[in-house]
Image: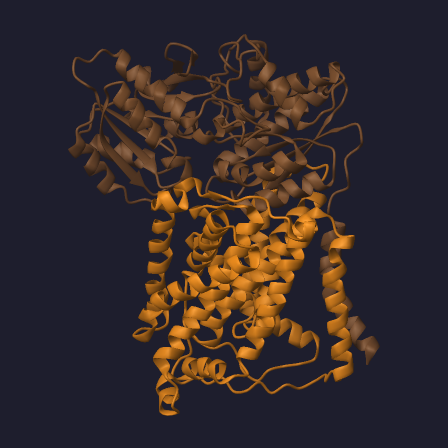
Chain colours: A brown, B orange
Amino acid sequence: MTTHWMTKICRLAAPLALGACLISAPAAAQDLKFSIPVPLSGPIAVTGQAQQIGWQHAIDYINKNGGIKGRKIDASYYDDEYKVELGVAGFKKAAADGNLTFAAGDGTPFVRAISPENNERYKVLMANTGASSDLVDVAKYKYHFLVGPTYSDMIGLLFKHIKAQGASTPPKVAIVYSASEFGRDPLENARAMAKAMDINIVLEEETKFTGVDVTAHAIKLRNAKPDYVIFHGYAGNIWPEIAKLAREYGVKAPFMGTLFGSHPDVVSGIGSAVDGYLGTVSVELALKDRQEPMLKVIDGYLRTWTAKPYTGYANIGYMQSWATAMILREVIGRAIDAGKPLNGDTLIAEINALKDWDSGGIFGTPISFEKQRIPYGVIYRYSWPNGQFTVTPVGGFQKTE
Amino acid sequence: MASASTTLPAPARIGLRISPRVQLGLWLVLGLGLVFFPAFAGVYFVYMASLIAINIIATVGLNITVGYAGLLSIGHSAFLGVGAYVSGLMWLHLGTPLLVNVVGGALAAFAVGLVFGIPALRIKGVYLAIATLAAQYSLYFVFQQWTSVTGGDRGLSLPQLNVFGMGETGFYYVVVAIMVALLVAARNLFRTRIGRAFIAVRERDYAAEVLGINVVRTKLLAFGLGAAFAGAAGALTAAFLRIVTPDQFTLLVSVFFLAAVVVGGRASILGSILGAIFMTLMPELLQHGLTAVSKGADLAGLIAPLREIIFGSLIIGFLLFEPRGLVGLVERAFGRSETFDSRPEG
């Protein structure tokens, strides 16, 4: 009887044991261990997949060029589905194996959840591809840096551009945003900035993050009669539909947007309905025929991404991964040169010590960190002169205020 | 849930009988395994074990409402949210200990569950499911908009919890102890008049009323108890993640728990346990397995979609070939069978 029971228990336990055996082996001691959770499934998978390819290309480039001071990067990727508990699980798994040099964060909720514990216990350098406004709280997010400005900074750049047009009356702006944590993120600061800059926000319209019926939103836009429309907090859908329908309803106002709504492939897919769209981003996106050394390298890698037709323009998530990897190469290299241990304290100090760093073209200007973020952005104009889609910077990289 | 023409006879157990001594031995082994697990497992495994235990509590709660009482609910995660926010606020403002917070979260969710259980008095089946969406959306709205209390989108950040000075291991023991206590309570519930009333109401509420069962009270209690389990799970989630935000309690999370009930087995405590383990662990195992298999090949971009496809196929497979869920598989493996098939929706 006992044997019979044992056999059955073994039968049930076998799949679990197999799963445990499949867990990957630890990295070599000399390698620099990176943990990179990305949302490969779930609501923002489009961005996550581009981020992962960007990381893979950037790490391949670094490793093929001698690693960081001779030490190769060993990256592990983890699909956290944009869920906090899975992000934390992935982080803990990587941290538990020891010697974790860097951990990426695919979203601000995950960074908010792990930061208290990371500050007290793990002390691992982190970077997040989101841009929520509270991430500049350097006491709360002690070991975290942002590879670009915050969403509020980006709205500020757009407001600055609007004011620079020199209208005689206060310009009327409509903000259309997604019902998500990052969609609502800059609203409070946007209201304050608008008041200070004498800009009249005539509509704040919240939409779903995904969906198809956008008629009501387009009608509200038409009725508000704005001079400018800012879309914020979208990955790839909803806002294109609203923009197209609003144009059909006679809305003539220029369309603008922030980081993840400004993917060239998304905007080009909408077509000439959004001709003249202005998008604020944190990194260079136009790579074709560029002479800056890193942009040439990245362009070469971009051409090898066979799943995505080459257009000469990079996805924002893809470029953000490259930007983060290159910053890490610089600061980890400096720490190794200085003989410092590679922990959160020394590496975040190196991040804050970067002054006028030349990224080889990834950022269109020498950069320095402020409040552990890069306070520079560029406004791109997306247009179709002669029917050909082009992305051109408006006034170059500028510092946020 | 059950149609008027279907019945759920008492399961006729056949096959292997386990002697009380063997049963006691097995329980001892399981208990010792749970106690000594952190000694052999790393931080990640202790974390995952705690997450599974929390999900088991929430799944058992939903199974009480959906499986035993036959009241379809797709607003379960909102009750987790109530528990999480109430316990988080108690912790932040009153400084109460974890166990008090868990009880507070459970009681608050119980009260809210009673309110949102009111539609169950008039409607059932898919109509009730739609009505429970009200709980999901209205409570999410409260979590997100009542910024002065809930912190809005950024939520509540909670201080570090160090149970018995043992960090994650201490928390693991607390979660497992609460889970075991609630599992025993749930199991014993269905040996009582109240629990049997749940089943009677599920089978045919008119007949139950004729037998002297207060259908109104029973249905409300089923909702309230299910919500209370969710509230306890929510309170533990808050302490576990040290953050409470509205996006942790969306409709998708409710669907996750409903799937755990269906995959594990309706009207079964063991089914709830297996369903929660499956839904929590299988995506992780698939991810690790596919990553290991694809080592050396450029398949990184395919792992996520492959995992989704395999996970979805497994769920469909269960529904097709073992409608009683994982509990049916286990009973089959141990030579048991039950005489009833899956029950159609009413």
At horizontal 41% and vertical 16% (from top left) the residue drawn is A400
At horizontal 47% and vertical 49% (from top left) the residue drawn is B248
| Residue B215, above or below B61 | below
Image location of residue B215, percent across then percent down:
36, 81
At horizontal 46% and vertical 57% (from top left) the residue drawn is B83
At horizontal 58% and vertical 72% (from top left) the residue drawn is B269
Image location of residue B21, percent across then percent down:
78, 82
Q: Nearer the viewer, residue A28 or B291?
A: A28
Q: Nearer the viewer, residue B2 or A237?
A: B2
Position of the N terminus of chain B by quadrant: bottom left
State the residue lying farthest toward the right: A3
Q: Nearer the viewer, residue B257 or B209?
A: B209
Image location of residue B291, percent across then percent down:
68, 43
Give the quadrant of residue A158.
top left
State the residue lying farthest toward the bottom: B211
Q: Is residue A120 visible?
A: yes
Is A23 situated left or right of A43 in this image? right
Q: Is residue A386 visible?
A: no
